[in-house]
Every structure is written in C-alpha cells, then in structure tokens.
Amino acid sequence: MKEADYIIVGLGIAGITFCEQLERYGHSFVVFDTAEGSATAIAGGTINPVMLKRFTPVWKATEFFSEALSFYQNLSNKLNVPMVDVMPIHRILNNVLEQNNWLLASDTKKLSPFISSEIFTDENPSVVMPFGYGSVLQSFKLNLEKMLKAYRRYLLKKNCLISEKFDHTKLVVGKNEFQYENFKAKQLVFAEGAAAMHNPYFSIDSLIPKKGEYIIFKAPQLRLKCILKGAFFIIPMGNDLYKAGATFAHGDTSYTVTRKGKDQLIAAVKKMISCPFEVVDQFIGMRPTVKDRRPLLGRISESKPVFFNGLGTRGLLMAPLLAKQLYDYTENSIPLSEEIDINRYV
Ligand SMILES: Cc1cc2nc3c(=O)[nH]c(=O)nc-3n(C[C@H](O)[C@H](O)[C@H](O)COP(=O)(O)OP(=O)(O)OC[C@H]3O[C@@H](n4cnc5c(N)ncnc54)[C@H](O)[C@@H]3O)c2cc1C
C-alpha cells in the first residue's frame, strides 16, 4: 500500500494550482488524470480582469489578477518553460456610444488601473475598426499546451502522476482516510471540472457545463501582435495561426464540434479582419459553470472528499488564489467565504 497526504483527481488548472500549494508546504500527493475533456487544455488562455461586453471589472479583479500573474511567472521559472506572454487586449469599439462608455468606465476607480483612458486607431490594415479600440492595460496570455505538458512531465518525474481514469466505485471512504486501489491518503480532492457531473459524491445540481467552440485559422497577412476582441476573441498563436472564439452553446453538453459553431465564428472573424484566412481546425471545451457564477469549493456537508470546482469562464484567472484558500481550509480549518463554499447549494 502506498501512502500519501492527498489523492487529487484531475490535473486541469484546479489540480495544478492545488498541487503547487501542497508542494509549497511539503505534503505528499498522487494525482489521477486522463486529460480527457480538459477545459484547461483548450481554453483561450487570456488572463483578463475586465468584462469586455459592458466594461465592468470582473469579480475580485485586483486580487485574482495579481495572484495569477505571480503564480504563472513562478511556475514558468520553476519548470523552466516560458508560458506567460504579456499581451494587450484591444477591444474593438462598435460605435460612438461604445466610445463614450469606454471613456466613462476608464474614469472609474475600479477600472482605471485596468483600461486605457484613450481610444486608439489601429495601424494594421487588416483589422476592421472604424471606431477605434480601447486597450486593456493589464492582461496576459498563457501557453496552456506548454504549461500542461511541462507540468505532467514534472509530476511523472516525481512519480506522482497516474494517467488513468479514477473509478469512483473503487473508492473506500474510511473514518480518517481514503483508500483507492493500492493508495491510501488522509485527504482527497476532486478537481474534475465539468466531469464532476458523473461523480457520485458530487451530490448537488448547480454545475451547468457550458460548451465553447474555437476555430483555428491561418492568416499570413494579419500579423497581429495583440489579442483582438470583437464579437469573439482572436488570439495570436504564432506561425500565422490564430484562435477565434469561444462560442457559448447553452444546453449542448456533447463533446463534438458543430457546423453552427464554425459558421458563427467565421462570420464574426470576417467582421473583424479584412485579409484572407483559412480555417485549419476546430475544437470544443466544457466550461464548469455554476448557477450563480461563483466557484464551488470545500466539502459537501459532513461528507469527506473536498471539491475544487465551478471555475466557470475565468478559471485560469481565479484558480491560483482559490487554491490558496482551499489549502487553508483543508489544512488550517479556515472557513471558506460563503460565496465560494459549495454548501450554499446543499
Ligand atoms: C472554450 C473555453 C475557453 C476558455 N477561455 C478561458 C480564458 O481565456 N481565460 C480563463 O481564465 N478561463 C477560460 N476558460 C475557463 C477555464 O478553462 C476553466 O474554468 C478551467 O480550465 C477549469 O479547470 P478545471 O481544472 O476545473 O477543469 P479541467 O481543466 O476540465 O480539468 C479537469 C481534469 O480532470 C480530469 N478528470 C476528470 N474526471 C476524471 C476521472 N474520473 N479520472 C481521471 N481524470 C479525470 C480531466 O481529464 C481533466 O484533465 C475557458 C473555458 C473554455 C471551455
């Protein structure tokens, strides 16, 4: 029997940020992850503290953003893999009303640190923006493929990653420990993203997975150096490739790409850029969203496993700080705030 302080199920951003807390304080752990259906693997990777639809700050923008920036920079250094790309987001303004609203928002205390107080015009002839753009001053982009690959490699080297499906029916929950096959641990953390829907211990119905589709297109003439936000994001990936998305498909929980999603994205890209482009790929991800758009952390009532879920549409931004709060909860018995405690749904 192998013993560890923690068993973690899931190695998306929730799993990674929690593992980092455990390492920091010297705990042993083993992670089960198949990487199947990972939202983290296909996310846009933008760390953006501003809601660009209505020009409002995201919930706890300042706290989440500063923790996220230092977390990803430290992880980059630790793994010796550059994964943080500081890149502005240019929000295309659609009319005079949006120009006025942007300027008004930039004058508020909450948003002035994050958005430009000026409206700019783009020199790039391939970008369509007759009313100019506003710039998000603090934002960055993560190379998620590099991050996930490097982190898996790191855990494999430490001998604490098992690339297998965790079968909940084989879990034995004891009084003071969890037993799973030949592993024994004091704590168990489920960080399964949208797959928690199939976890029999996840006995609440507030998780509503929201499917998102992206297309990847090639556009040699575009030469974009920033993230562009119109109806969707256009995110540079290097080698003349761009990611455009992501859609919100309400009520569709299938893991398959759709013609509708592709058409919607192509139509939006055509409005944002004027140069030719060719779609080379399309994929989907499932956002683990919650009814009240807040994370789901902690134990359900008196049951034993801990959940780190409900990261929704901005999990990459929020996970680093939430992992700290979850660690304080599991190790130091510091209560979670009511707005993120999973028990608000019990
Ligand atoms: C299309 C799209 C775009 C997004 N863009 C952004 C963005 O730009 N910025 C941002 O901040 N957020 C973004 N998000 C949100 C963000 O990606 C998610 O909130 C976050 O990745 C969720 O992380 P997670 O670790 O909870 O889940 P996941 O990343 O889904 O990880 C769960 C892991 O658990 C594994 N797993 C589950 N069950 C089992 C089991 N039984 N056995 C073994 N392994 C298991 C899965 O294989 C997976 O690897 C986006 C999401 C989507 C879908």
Image (cartoon, rainbow, N blue to C red):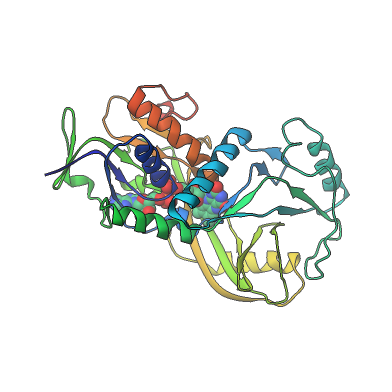
Task: Identify the residue at horizontal 27%, vertical 42% (top origin).
Answer: 29
Task: Identify the residue at horizontal 70%, vertical 53% (top origin).
Answer: 89
Count of marks placed on residues: 0
Question: Residue 178 appears at what percent x and percent y?
Answer: 19, 36
- Quadrant of the frame with the N terminus: top left
Asked if residue 79 lies left or right of residue 180, the reply is right
Q: State whether residue 90 is above or below residue 215.
A: above
Task: Identify the residue at horizontal 47%, vertical 61% (top origin).
Answer: 145
Write down the quadrant of residue 131 in the picture. Answer: bottom right
Write down the quadrant of residue 309 in the picture. Answer: top left
Q: State whether residue 92 is above or below residue 6.
A: below
Question: Residue 4 appears at what percent x and percent y?
Answer: 22, 40
- Quadrant of the frame with the C terminus: top left
Residue 335 in view (yes/no): yes
Task: Identify the residue at horizontal 47%, vertical 30% (top origin).
Answer: 340
| Residue closest to the far right | 96
Question: Residue 141 appears at what percent x and percent y?
Answer: 59, 54
Residue 35 in view (yes/no): no
In terms of depth relative to the viewer, which is nearer, 180 or 101? 180
| Residue closest to the far left | 1
Asked if residue 38 lies left or right of residue 55, the reply is left
In terms of depth relative to the viewer, which is nearer, 72 or 164? 72
Asked if residue 111 lies left or right of residue 335, the reply is right
